[in-house]
Amino acid sequence: MSDACPKCQSTEVSLLKRPTSLGYQRFRCKRCRCTFNERSGTVFNFLEYPTDLVLMVVRWRLRYCLSLRNLSEMMLERGFEFE
Ligand SMILES: [Zn+2]
């Protein structure tokens, strides 16, 4: 779960009203006051694409040997441009 502060590990966090631009839930730590989201502290944090979409593209690329053009078409269907 991602409801512990990535900086101080406190689980005393509150859910913020506004999600990130990709729709991930944001939290504020009540102990150290930092804000973080569901992906903070993961390798996906700085991606500009949703985690599930990245995982799907990687899986399909490995499973079906799709070309990058095929993959960018798939992402476009989800509303993301990718080259
Ligand atoms: Zn904290």
Image (cartoon, grey):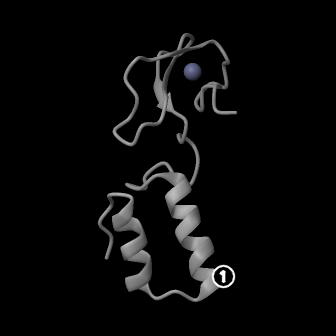
On screen, residue 34 versus residue 20, left or right, reads: right
How many numbered circles are shown? 1
Quadrant of the rendered structure where residue 63 is? Answer: bottom right
Residue for badge 1: 63
**Element type at marker 1?**
helix
On screen, residue 58 versus residue 82, left or right, reads: right
- Quarter of the image containing the C terminus? bottom left
Residue 12, above or below 61:
above
Quadrant location, ligand no. 1 = top right
Please tell me which residue is depicted at 58% across the width and 48% down the height of the picture.
42
Please tell me which residue is depicted at 67% across the width and 18% down the height of the picture.
11
Residue 3 lies, in percent from the top left, at 63, 26
Residue 79 lies, in percent from the top left, at 32, 58
On screen, residue 81 versus residue 15, left or right, reads: left
Task: Confirm or reject: label 1 Cβ below 8 Å from ligand 1.
Answer: no
Residue 58, above or below 44:
below
Callout 1, which amino acid?
Arg
On screen, residue 73 versus residue 24, left or right, reads: left
- Which sits in the foreground, 2 or 59? 59
- Quarter of the image containing the N terminus? top right
Q: Residues within 10 Å of mark 1 (few under 14, many from 20)?
A: few
